[in-house]
């Protein structure tokens, strides 16, 4: 399994893209940085997009990639929960802000949207996918993705503390999660459903207690302006836990 971090941040600039991951060039998770980081041929290779939740930094490129697929006569499968479907059809693909590519062109709409049921394993392309609810103000699911040769990655999506229940359902070799801000914003993070390095540490301790091991950890969704501070605090957590925890970045390639 080859995992590419396309967008690793919660704010966009020339040097930082919003959240998107790409697995084996064909399966995307979240659509914050899909079109701005991939050539047209690379976009065409994507067969399916899994969306964790409705926040703008995770769904932003759905209209853009749908337009590209429409103009090349292709279709794309999108999978997520009912609230994400509602947000997309109410606000972005409502026929006013942008065409409703879930219904156009009528004979073969660009987007085929499939509702995914949490905690029920589904086959999507050649992968086993398990959506697992996490703690965030908008309803959010993380995705555990298992390749045909048994490699397993779990991406939490945006989440605050309290992942013990979630850990029960997953056993990844690689955990991709979030660390939005440094520890001085811990209270803000708790209120807004995000993690800081010390909040992540607590979640990893609970993972290890429950599962008896820790996977390799990559964090994304950093605020670019606070990244140096986050990096130093994450390094300290990695030291204490004797585990690999690194910051993701645009263009990062991970292999399982
Ligand atoms: Zn969010
Ligand atoms: Zn976000």
Image (cartoon, grey):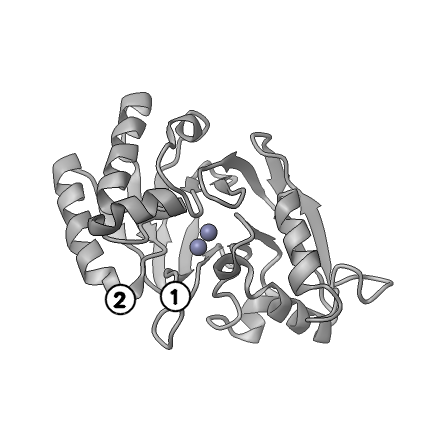
Q: Is residue 237 visible?
A: yes
Number of the label disc, if any, that sits on residue 236: none
For the point 50% across and 57% down, the residue is: 58
Where residue 130 sits, quadrant-wise, is: top right
For the point 37% across and 44% down, the residue is: 191
Camera-side residue of 173 and 231: 231
Camera-side residue of 5 and 229: 229
Q: Check contact, mark 2 vs mark 1: CB within 8 A.
A: yes
Near mark 2 (Cα within 10 A), the count class, few <14, some 14-19 or many ≥20, is: few
Label 2 CB, ligand 2: below 8 Å?
A: no
**In the rendered view, would you say 144 is above or below 79?**
above
Residue corresponding to mark 2: 225
Q: In terms of sequence position, does the residue under pointer 2 or pointer 1 come before the other?
A: 1
x%, y% of residue 185? 25, 51
Camera-side residue of 46 and 168: 168
Label 1 CB, ligand 2: below 8 Å?
A: no
Could you say whether the residue bearing mark 1 is in a helix, strand or loop? Answer: loop
Number of numbered discs visible in the structure rendering: 2
Could you say whether the residue bearing mark 2 is in a helix, strand or loop? Answer: helix
Q: Is residue 256 visible?
A: no
x%, y% of residue 76? 67, 59
For the point 50% across and 35% down, the residue is: 133
Where residue 87 sits, quadrant-wise, is: bottom right
From the viewer's perspective, tell me whether residue 233 is left or right of residue 25.
Answer: left
For the point 49% across and 73% down, the residue is: 36
- State the CA–CA distance, disc 2 to disc 1: 9 Å
Number of the label disc, if any, that sits on residue 11: 1
**In the rendered view, would you say 159 is above or below 73?**
above
Near mark 1 (Cα within 10 A), the count class, few <14, some 14-19 or many ≥20, is: some
**In the rendered view, would you say 76 is above or below 217?**
below
Image quarter hosting the C terminus: top left
x%, y% of residue 44? 61, 67
């Amino acid at each position: 399994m080859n995992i590419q971090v396309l967008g690793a941040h919660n704010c966009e600039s020339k040097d930082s893209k919003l959240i998107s991951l790409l697995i084996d060039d064909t399966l995307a998770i979240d659509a914050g940085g899909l079109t701005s980081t991939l050539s047209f041929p690379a976009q065409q290779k994507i067969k399916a997009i899994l969306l964790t939740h409705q926040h703008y930094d995770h769904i932003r490129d759905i209209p853009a990639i749908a337009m590209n697929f429409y103009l090349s006569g292709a279709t794309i499968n999108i999978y997520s929960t009912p609230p994400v479907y509602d947000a997309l059809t109410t606000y972005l693909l409502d026929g006013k802000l942008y065409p409703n590519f879930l219904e156009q062109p009528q004979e073969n709409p660009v987007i085929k949207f499939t509702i995914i049921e949490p905690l029920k394993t589904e086959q999507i392309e050649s992968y086993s996918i398990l959506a697992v609810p996490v703690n965030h103000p908008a309803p959010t699911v993380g995705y555990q993705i298992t390749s045909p040769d048994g490699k397993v990655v779990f991406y939490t999506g945006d989440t605050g503390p309290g992942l013990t229940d979630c850990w029960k359902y997953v056993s990844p070799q690689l955990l991709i999660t979030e660390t939005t801000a440094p520890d001085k914003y811990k209270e803000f993070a708790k209120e807004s459903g995000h993690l800081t390095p010390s909040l992540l540490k607590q979640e990893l301790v609970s993972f290890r207690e429950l599962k008896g091991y820790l996977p390799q950890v990559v964090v994304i969704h950093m605020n670019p302006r606070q990244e140096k501070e986050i990096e130093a605090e994450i390094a300290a957590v990695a030291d204490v836990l004797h585990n690999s925890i690194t910051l993701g970045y645009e263009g990062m390639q991970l292999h399982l």
